[in-house]
Image (tube, rainbow, N blue to C red):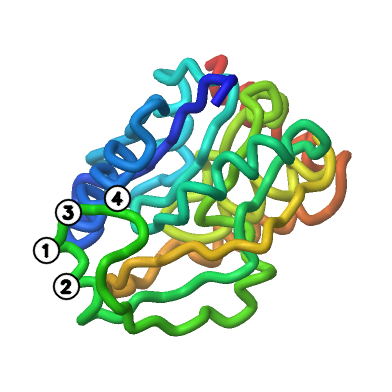
Amino acid sequence: MSKKVSVIIPIGLNDQPREQLFHWVKKYYEIMFPHVELCIGALDEKPFSKGKAINEAVKKSTGEILVINDADVFFDPALLEESIEQLESHSWVIPYNEVLNISEKSTEDLLKLEPEWPIPIDLETRPRTHGARIKGGVNIIPRNHFEKVHGFDERFVGWGGEDDAFASALKHLCGPFKRLDGTIYHLWHSRKTNENYEANVELLRAYRAGKDSIIKEIEKRKAIDNN
């Protein structure tokens, strides 16, 4: 791996179920990717802002290439090398076209094991609907492109919307992505409702309104950061 890579993992410290998954995923990367820089964005805030956690972790990182990775997701290590190669001709990479949701039972079994690849047990999984359209979970991007879109929008509070907004900003300001024929694995956890969902949806509309609208939103965020 010729370029320095930083894996960015956001986690809310007030979410006990996801914390358990995070510790396993963190150890997975420590074992399977020993040469990457692992940077954790840990926030003890309610409601949790995934975007803020990511931005804080990126500030601590030094890699030329950033792997933005959810705390409940892992993938075949070979996909990282392939993604880095694709960055030579594409602005950013989504290293999968399939998301496999691991069952509650298989997640419990997996958490008892030392992380390794290939996974040593048969997993009960179910493909997520429209997995080939999802843009979050894992993104692999050059640092300069992350900086060009001013990172993630921290105004998204709770889960939902921040990944699509980030993807739209990258697409319009940096160029289209390359999607690989790969799979990511999503560990089971209970789902929570988000009281800020409607506000997130409204904010996302601005990112779906085109390049000029996205630039305006980025300028608003810069103004907030400078105050």
**Distance from the alpha carbon under mark 4 to that under mark 3:** 10 Å
* Mark nearer the viewer, 1 or 4: 1
Cα distance between the residues tagged 1 and 4: 12 Å
Specify the label residue 114 is tagged with.
Answer: 3
Say if mark 4 contacts mark 3, CB within 8 Å.
no
User: Which badge, 3 or 2, comes first in the chain's sequence?
Assistant: 2
Q: Secondary structure at mark 2?
A: helix
Disc 2 target residue: 109
Query: Disc 1, disc 4: CB below 8 Å?
Result: no
Residue 28 left/right relative to 212: left
Spatial CA distance of label 1 from label 2 is: 5 Å
Instruction: State the separation of the CA atoms marked 3 and 2.
Output: 11 Å
Q: Residue at x 78, y 35 (%)?
A: 216
Three-letter amino acid code at disc 1?
A: Lys
Label 2 is placed on what type of residue? Answer: Asp
Q: Secondary structure at mark 4?
A: helix
Q: CA distance from mark 4 to mark 2?
A: 14 Å
Mark 4 against mark 3, which lies toward the viewer? 3
Most extreme residue toward the left is 112
Write down the residue under mark 1: 112
Q: Relative to 124, does residue 223 appear above or below in the rendering?
A: above
Q: Residue at x 55, y 43 (%)?
A: 80
Query: In the rendered structure, are the residues bearing label 1 and label 2 in contact, judged by CB atoms less than 8 Å apart?
Result: yes
* Crowding near the residue tagged with mark 2, few <14, some 14–19, many ≥20 C-alpha atoms within 10 Å: few
Q: Amino acid at mark 3?
A: Glu
Q: Residue 25 has which mark?
A: 4
Q: Are marks 3 and 1 in contact (CB under 8 Å)?
A: no
